[in-house]
Amino acid sequence: MNSHKKQLNITFLGTGTSQGIPMIASTDPVCLSKDSKDKRLRSSILISWDDVSYTVDCGLDFRQQMLRENVQSLNGVFFTHEHADHIGGLDDLRPYCYQIGEMPIYLNERTFLSLEKRFEYIFTKENRYPGAPSVLPNIVNKDPFVVNGLEVIPIEVFHGKLPILAYRFGDLAYLTDVKYIADTEKKKLKNLDVLIVNALRIDAHPTHFNLEEALQLVEELQPKRAYFTHISHKLGFHEKVSKNLPKNIFLAFDGLKITV
């Protein structure tokens, strides 16, 4: 299979942490910044190849992100985990469901059970609301699978003590909300063209990589390029932080487009 040779087009739909930047009621200088690159919606990417497009996660800003990027069709969603900033836009899949019927979603069993509970009206079989989005769950474990001709490799990472999913698509990997990765799973992240990983802030955090930990992972894995995402205002100003990063490591920003 030549899936690694497919051209992948990535759009950073959002690069912020769970509360976004600016954060409500904050007078932090980064939250008050006039630089558009310091305005961050909740983290997600759009990944396209051939004539298909998928998102990784659909959070609370999903509708706004789809409108901003003028995304006319969507073929599915890969979920990392069940926290609100990664699943809160599930209902806004409706316009795309009208186009294709059932929307394929890829997720681990824990996330699926959480969606069933939190969005009961979507998954119930009895007296189902006719306007609810129709989704087709695909339960993912650690085994690779193929979607529209592209091999997808799930990677188990830990968000604090919570096991969540990262994904490798060809020679690109997307990791968010990561604090720990076992050595066995790191082997899936070798020989990357692009690594996207969370870098929450300068100070240590119990459930997320801080900047130092993200830099250490890049140094260990040696991708050709790395982009940091899932950023809080406590990381600092985009322009200032960017100037101090090593060569080939970049702060992502909302709307950034890259090709792999």
Image (cartoon, helix red, strand yellow):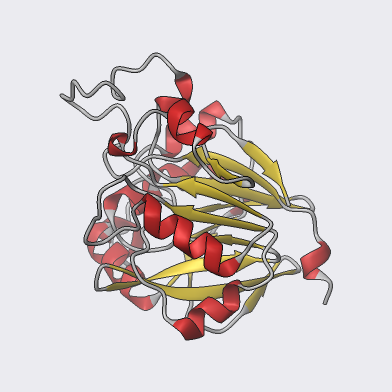
Q: Does residue 29 appear to the left or right of 7 in the view shown? A: left
Q: Quick check: 193 left or right of 66?
A: right
| Residue drawn at 36 percent across, 77 percent down | 109
Q: In this view, does 232 lie above or below 153?
A: above
93 over 142 or under it: above or below:
above
Q: Residue 107: percent from the left, percent from the top?
A: 44, 69
Q: Looking at the picture, how far across and down is residue 187, in whole percent?
A: 57, 80
In front: 200, or 25?
Answer: 200
Q: Which residue is drawn at 31% across and 74% down?
A: 110
Q: Residue at x 44, y 18 (%)?
A: 35
- Residue 154: percent from the left, percent from the top? 53, 74
Identify the residue at the far left of this view. Answer: 25
202 or 193: which is nearer to us? Answer: 202
Can residue 131 be seen here? The reply is no
**Looking at the image, which residue is at 67% across and 65% down?**
192
The quarter of the picture where the N terminus appears is bottom right
Q: In this view, does 61 lie above or below 230?
A: above
The image quarter in which residue 31 lies: top left
Specify the quadrant of the image occupied by residue 42: top left
Residue 184, how many percent across, how many down? 49, 86
Residue 209 quadrant: bottom left
Return the residue found at the far top: 34
The reply, left or right, for residue 18 in relation to residue 218 is left
Q: How many numbered markers are drawn?
A: 0
Between residue 161 and residue 30, name the one nearer to us. 30
- In the rendered image, is residue 150 in sight? yes
